[in-house]
Image: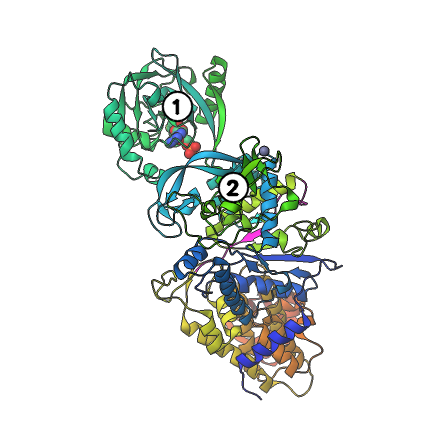
Amino acid sequence: MREYKPNEIEKKWHEIWEEREPFKASNKSDKPKFYALVEFPYPSANGLHVGHPRPYTALDIVSRKRRLEGYNVLFPMGWDAFGLPTENFAIKNKIHPAIVTEQNVARFKAQLQSIGFSFDWSREINTTDSHYYKWTQWIFLKLFEKGLAYKQEMPINWCPSCKIGLANEEVIQGNCERCGGEVVRRVKNQWMLKITEYADRLIKDLDTVDYIERVKTQQTNWIGKSEGAEVDFQISGKEDKLRVFTTRPDTLFGSTYMVIAAEHPLIEKYKDEIENLEEIKEYQHEISKKSDFERTELSKDKTGVEIKGLKAINPATGREIPIWISDYVLMSYGTGAIMAVPGHDTRDWEFAKKFNLPIVEVIKGGDIEKESYTDTEEGIVINSDFINGMEVKEAKKYMIKWLEEKGLGTGKVNFKLRDWVFSRQRYWGEPIPLVYCDECGWVPVPENQLPVMLPDVENYEPTDTGESPLANIKDWVETTCPKCGGKAHRETDTMPQWAGSSWYFLRYIDPLNEEEFASQEALEYWLPVDWYNGGMEHTTLHLLYSRFWHKFLYDIGVVPGPEPYAKRTSHGMILGDNNEKMSKSRGNVVNPDDIVRDYGADTLRTYEMFIGDFEKSVPWSENGVKGCRRFLERVWKLQDILADDEGYTKELESSIHKTIKKVSEDFETLKFNTGVAALMSLLNEFNDHGSITKEDLKTFIILLNPVAPHITEELWEILELEGYLHDTTWPVYDEEKTKDKVIALPVQVNGKVRGTIEISIDDSQDVAREKAKADDNISRFLEGKQIVKEIFVAGKIYNIVVK
Ligand code: ANZ
Ligand code: ZN
């Protein structure tokens, strides 16, 4: 027997696969289809780390299994290559971002190929390829045409160090997601996409897809649907009303003061009448530096200033109440003003305690001296005139009706979700295909002139004015209006990194199509994606954005269904061996290249799956890697115990059927670790048994193949099995044979165990009696005696009392 040399074997099989193309998907096939998708990587300068292969191996296993089960499988890969890190790296090292991208892609691709993933490389895509971004621009134009892209002065999150506007989602606890630096607010004219128009459907349609629960919950919370009412509070002695949004109209009688956001226009309007304008201005200035996140942090000490000289009237009680400003009320949500109900809202309660404002109990059940009572399920309304005694739920409805009848307010649904800031003032992104004409306004570049190519420039460094570097390229910017032929200039902002990934799964379906982003026929065949696995960190960004774009494409009739992904699962992170997140700065990054070189790709893959529960974060361990290598060595040595005859090993039959069942099920239910463990224990049984048939070994290597494809293909060849493993079929099990049927049942005679009988668990007491009588040891105690009592517990014990 040869030595197990993974590097040689793996290289050999990569060549065979490249030559034979067993993983190539066909757009015309009679087979059932299966579309497996993993998130395409951003090709950074760092290369892969061992976290990347975890989800890739998982869906590679599913894809390989499906092919053996007779499916036409699409399992593609590509590059999400626009974006800041590449641009920043390019600037720092004075290399064009396109060249940086090319180098990084080459490195990533070589790494992925060395691990032996069964991607259909003939469908490789790259978001920075103009043949690709032509269609990203095309989709943007469709959005623009339908009024879903608009330009607006926006206070945006500005990262002074990256010199870029960030979407809310890219600001993590007040800091830039990319560089970690502090984010400030700045007003900028930005392209926006109206994702809010799809908010309701984005929640509702989650019922139609098979996503793991935490993904559904996170998306639902992020979209944040709130049902309640808008209520008008008259400003005492003035024409104006102050409108609030509340989810608790049932507590209106308990509103003892109001709070408006610091930016609320009411302040500017009544500046001459506000007695403490100076104090208010000072407060406004103080909090203008803070992000929304900091302002609304629950734990923080409440601050605020009363607006002296203005009062509002509670429409339910008719009483005058004070108006305050505080940072805990945001201008960007609801109406930018609230009715404060300190008895039943935590933040209002803390604020009222601090500034000595009255607290009125209007829902029974708590102790509002100690804390606000916020339970909405149990409470009964009190101190509230005509709604006293009602349950909260009923009172809400009643109050909305009352407000509407009196013309004081209306029922209202609000969403936390904001429109998507779609402009970036950077170079390395898709140009926004619009031109501005003084006569015609914003005019789309005609479809037949797409793509609007990203111009080649000398200097793509960001400008301090916050304009995109494209603004400096005069002969690119200056153009003619497609509508009137007059002078016009191009939009110089580019799209955010999320643009290309919002529809990439569609392009894989028909990647070379020059006429359409994909042919209708191919889309009909492949969609929806059957299984999409990706990181939890993409739940509220990429996953939501791509669902939004897909719904839009569905609405304009260019994709066949309203949801892109039938199923979504997610993996846990791989941590450093010290249990910390892997990162360059912590120095605990493991490079898969090293593992492949020292142990082989099959060992890497096996360990990636065996490391632990797929859905949980787990620390890397070099010892674990070694254990998996030893397992594969033992698999290799199974050749040694191959029985000469082709005989059938009855003893192993049940174990084999059980393992087929276990592995088949585990690979479908994210239990890759226990699937591998089942193969390890079958291997132990083989060795305990001392010999195995070719047939049993064949079954074993097919089951192991999706996890460790190289060693198993090689063993297939060594065993001189027919054709190639990748052309064979997945084994089926016989449910009957997976059951532990025959057991050894202990038999007692007058309280003493006298022997055991081999009996099936389904057998009756009569069968047990016959077997006991037939057993030499037991029958000795029965002969010449009379059976007076029997206790038969199937599968456990058979007790006979004789006289
Ligand atoms: C009165 C009230 C009584 C409220 C009560 C809550 C409990 P969600 O569920 O997140 O939508 N609110 C409204 N606009 C706000 C803004 N711009 N900034 C900060 N807070 C705002 O929350 C809606 C509730 O948050 C609203 O209902 C309002 O307070 C507050 F017992 O109104 B409530
Ligand atoms: Zn014009």
The image shows residue 171, relative to residue 792, as above or below, that is above
Counting labels gives 2
Q: Nearer the viewer, residue 504 or 357?
A: 504
Label 1 sits on a secondary structure element that is: helix
Q: Is residue 485 magenta?
A: no
Q: Which is in the foreground here, disc 1 or disc 2?
A: 2
- In the rendered image, which residue does mark 1 sit on? 251
Q: Nearer the viewer, residue 220 or 538?
A: 538
Task: Indicate which disc residue 491 carries.
Answer: 2
**Which residues are the magenta region?**
557-573
Residue 163 x, y percent position in the rendering = 38, 47
Could you tell me what secondary structure mostly forms the magenta stretch? loop
Q: Picture coordinates of residue 750 (x, y %)? A: 52, 71
Q: Is residue 751 visible?
A: no
The secondary element bearing badge 2 is classed as: loop
The percent coordinates of residue 52 (x first, y second) are: 48, 62
Depth check: give the residue in front, 473 or 750: 473
Label 1, ligand 1: CB separation under 8 Å: yes
Is 802 rendered above or below residue 177?
A: below
Q: Residue furthest right?
A: 30
Which quadrant of the picture is home to ligand 2?
A: top right
* Up-down relation of residue 693 to residue 763 (above or below): below
Question: Which of pointers 1 and 2 lies earlier in the amino acid sequence?
Answer: 1
Which residue does the image show at 45% across and 65% down from the upper left? 49
Determine the CA span between mark 1 and mark 2.
Answer: 49 Å
